[in-house]
Amino acid sequence: MAIRKQALACEAFTKLKAAYDGRKQVLTGWKQSGKRVVCIAGYDVPEEIILAAGMLPFRVTGYYGGERVSAEKYLEYSFGAIWKGLWESIAEDYAGLMDHLVFCSSSDMFLKLFYYFRTMKRLEPERPLPDLKYLDFELVEHVFKTQERNERELRDLIGTVEGWSEKKVTDADLRASIALCNEYRAALSEFSVLRGRDDCRVTGSEALVVIGGSMFMEKQEAIDAVRAVTGAARGWDMAGGARVYYVGSPQETTEVYELAEANGLNIVGEDHDMGARMFDTQVRTDIAPVPALAARLLDRMPSSEKGSIAARVKAVGEKLEETGADALLTYMNNNDEAYVWDYPSIRKSVLEPRGIPSDTVQKQTWPLTEPEALANQFRELAATVKEAHNG
Amino acid sequence: MAEEKKTYETRSIKRLEATKAASAYQKEWFRSLKPRVEAGEPFALVGADAPMEILRAMDIPFVVYQWWTAICAAKQMNTQMYGYIRDAGYRDDICSYCSTAYACALDPHPEEGPWGGLPKPSILITQSECSVMGKIENLMAEAFGAEQYTMQRYYEPVITEKWWEKTIEHWDQLANERRRDFFERELRDLIAFLEQKTGRMFDMNKLREIMDYVNEQDYWYRKTRDLIAETKPCPVTISDTVNAVMQAQWQRGTKSATEHAKSLYEEVKYRADNNMPAVPNERIRLMWIGRGLWFNLGFYNYFEEKYGAAFIWSMYLGLAADAYGRENYESDPLKALGTRFSMITDFLHTPPFNSEWFLKEARHNQVDGVVLLTTENCMNNGDFYYNMVKTLEDNGFPVCLLRADPADAKKWNQETMTAAVEDLIVNRIEPKLSK
């Protein structure tokens, strides 16, 4: 299990893995070749707008290369592993590599980091920080004023990237970039079919590499690579393990998925944006580009952090059905625990009536402090699923 | 529900009639509230950021659920309350400041709560400052059978320098026009919701009357804050002012709250004029940043007696003095109110608004050091403490960080916390004073 030899023997997969493992090198390479890059911290910044301005979007993820010294110095304990990693990347690892950085309201912590870095520019003006922009989308309340608000934020972003790129963004530019990103999402959706119940050909960690690696490539290159992997993976061996749907803290590396796989599980879907949630909704092409981009923000699966409990119960129920998962895993980093308030309602309304086993992992850190305990928990969940199957 | 007994003294020394009067008024108000709710009147449970003046203008009684947490904590009831949450399958060690009211909804004997218990709300109005809060509010609304109305938030796009110089007279210079318009619309939408839900009509003239009272109330708070800041030794400590201000703020915008604020000033002034220091051996003045230590307000008194160290500043009076008043609102009361309810969080929790204000207050109040309480299990905790500590310490105010839960006593370690404050006093402040 985990990342198998068959995957590593696939050229397109290794290309995606190189991008996944070498994010900083990708950014450095783009910069060195004179490409204009807009970095993104947030799961709802529309890449379409950046592409329409002739720039490249680059998702900033956490630093996993060692101790997060800067984050430990500047951030309080309420920042969980993801957020400390992101701080370390922006403040240290990518220092000097980023010209522009756009945050958005996908998580409360993105706003905090935006405020902190805005203050850091005053506190330590010598620190090489990029231009900062924040997009305050409303992502929960589905009402007309939300659509208006989000369209306004998008138009703001268009104005900002026009300034950065010195290029006017036209409707035609936006339609072209929407078409390209829809094609990209469609390619990933097609790939995800291979995580399905009847013909499961990829493991969760392989899926993370394909999805994540494609984020750090130019779009057409990513589409081609994903399609090539999809074609090849149809011939891979079936991926075993108890089928698990994952909710909770985003996984920016394959470590936890691989640990799950080594202990009898296979994560076949997830609600975080380093995985399947990232491409779960297309942008409409039958309406004007900005309203269409705004509509997508509300059409997406409600995130585990922001979604209301009722919306989450419904969405998780649907995803369990859609992915054909045998179990639900809720995984929470320390101080990243909005999801804990969803779980009893999901258990009562979805899991118990359907007899779906579940487990909750809490207070996790990076690096993992107790991997053996986590492995045990995974083994127990796998055994529970097996037992349920055996009646 | 019985009050839990502690091995240390949890009750603070109350020197002021105004403190006792505030508590007495609240109890009586609560007693009068229950029959109104039972008779079918609307009753709102609201988040601390909700625009209470709108509810008051529509004569809809309300309780701020974070303040309710403070009351339950002061009555030593919270640990038991969180047990109800645990029994329902939730974690009882996180988000305590926002989950007490939910626990009350699960309490099999709600009438045994403080002041006869929290009446069952029909409306829940919130701004969902953080995502967890939003989820707890979902649960609260469901458990009480209340209709939830969530006001949208909008980030602070511009840094207003010295915001405290603009709030009262120049509130139109706070934030930018988009944000001011945004919150005015949020208020109008809330009014429309409340009118539809309750059948009560909003009265703009009533709102004007309320805002006048708020301005007067906060005028007295400014005078009280300034008097405390300038008087050495200090006539009162935060044991006196925290409850007196917080409970009266609950009734903000009424004649009685305004009169109470005036009486608080007069009492403090009397003590100042007649040389009646709260801590006769005052040598050290301390600032308490963060939520009140509700289950243990007696904590502060120990340092008064042993070191002559008086906690003279808390955000409750400071914020009432600098953040609430809005003069010159007549042409646009809703816009003025919008700049208040939307920005309190920024002033307290957003850098650099918070650090610069705390520094201004530290200087003005002539403090020697700062104790900063960081709320341990709050998922929304994050005020950029690094920046706060650096700003204060670079300007000569040593800071002690206490990591604790101000709502739930079960993890409180009196010894460790006392030692941390003693370390600040003995090793950082006293050597400086003796130079």
Image (spheres, coloured by chain):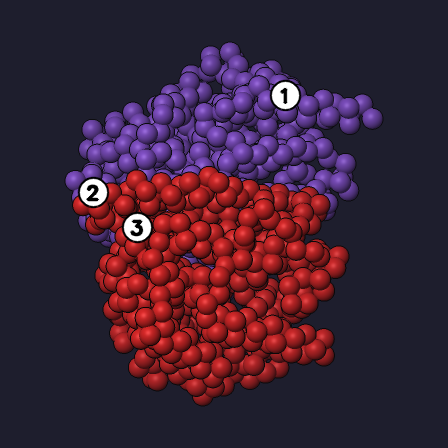
The extreme bottom residue here reads B205
Residue at the image point whose x is 55% and y is 84% from the top: B201
Q: Position of residue B342 (x, y in %)?
A: 40, 65
Closest to the observer: A290 or B106? B106
The three-letter code of the residue at mark 2 reads: Glu
| Position of residue A95 measured from the top left corner of the image (x, y, whole percent) | 24, 33
State the CA–CA distance, disc 3 to disc 2: 25 Å
Q: Which residue is mark 2?
A: A124
At 33% from the left edge and 74% from the top edge, which residue is drawn?
Answer: B274
Q: Inspect this view and state whether residue A183 appears.
A: no
- Nearer to the camera, B58 or B310: B310
Which is nearer the N-term, disc 2 or disc 1? Answer: 2
Identify the hue of chain B. Answer: red
Dot 3 surroundings within 10 Å: few (below 14), some, or many (20 or more)? many
* Amino acid at pointer 1: Asn
Chain A visual colour: purple
In what quadrant of the picture does the N terminus of chain B appear?
bottom right
Give SS at disc 3: strand
The residue under label 3 is which amino acid type? Gly
Q: Is residue A100 above or below residue B137?
A: above
Q: Do the dots labelled 2 and 1 sit on one chain?
A: yes
**Which residue has dot 1 on it?**
A376
**Lateral position of residue A266 relative to residue A132, left or right:** right
SS of the residue under disc 1: helix
Query: Which mark lies nearer to you, 3 or 1?
Result: 3
| Left or right of A333 on screen, residue B5 | right
Asked whether residue B27 appears in the rendered view, the answer is yes
Quadrant of the drawing holding the C terminus of chain B: top left
